[in-house]
Amino acid sequence: MRKMALAFILMLPLLASCSKEEAGYEGKDYIPFPLVGDFIVNVQDDSRQYVKCSITLELQDESLVADLTEKQYRVSAYITNAIGSKTAAQVKDPAERNLILAEIVSGINTEFNTKTVMRAFFTTFTTVRQ
């Protein structure tokens, strides 16, 4: 329970910085950009535990669509590294998964030198133990 409370406290600044008004959410429709294929990534602390997921990004405008399509390998590498650096306990915790998504959004925006990626969503998410 303490871990969950700590994760929530750590997320508060992130959530506050992503308010609907600041993010320009009011009255705007974002462009969904589903990333091609599933990501299958081993977690950091258990080589027999892995995550299988698919991700959709929401973009503020279409200016990044061509770049993301052409250079999706960079996005895939970033996502694989972000998920692969987490422990089995972290990927099972919903609050931690939200932090992973926030990290992915921030990383992609940094990688492409933009602020166009507004949010990311796991459209599927499964943890599997072999």
Image (cartoon, helix red, strand yellow):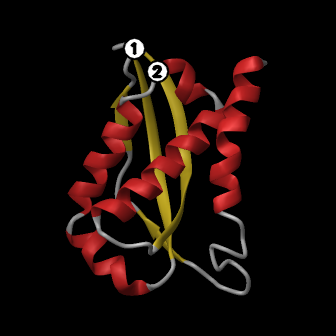
The image shows residue 123 at horizontal and vertical percentages of 55, 52
The image shows residue 127 at horizontal and vertical percentages of 51, 27
Residue drawn at x 34%, y 78% as measured from the top left = 64
Which corner quadrant of the image does residue 113 belong to?
bottom left
Query: Label 1 amino acid?
Result: Asp
User: Are the residues flagged by discs 1 and 2 in contact, CB closer than 8 Å?
Assistant: yes
Query: Label 2 amino acid?
Result: Thr
Q: Quadrant of the N terminus?
A: top right
What's the CA distance linking mark 1 and mark 2? 5 Å
Q: Is residue 129 above or below residue 12?
A: above
Q: What residue is shown with label 2?
A: 87
For residue 108, side relative to residue 6 (left or right): left
Q: Name the disc covering residue 83, or none.
A: none
Q: Is residue 103 above or below residue 3?
A: below
Q: Quadrant of the C terminus?
A: top left
The image shows residue 96 at horizontal and vertical percentages of 59, 34
Secondary structure of residue under mark 1: loop
Residue drawn at x 71%, y 46% as measured from the top left = 12
Secondary structure of residue under mark 2: loop
Q: For this rendering, which residue is in front, 111 or 17?
A: 17
Residue drawn at x 68%, y 54% as measured from the top left = 15
Whichever of labels 1 and 2 marks the residue nearer the N terminus, that label is 1
Specify few, some or many for label 2: CA neighbours under 10 Å numbering under 14, 14-19, or 20 or more.
some
Which corner quadrant of the image does residue 81 belong to?
top left
The image shows residue 20 at horizontal and vertical percentages of 72, 71
Q: For this rendering, which residue is in front, 33 or 13?
A: 13
Residue drawn at x 21%, y 65% as measured from the top left = 71
For residue 22, side relative to residue 73 (left or right): right
Q: What residue is shown with label 1?
A: 45
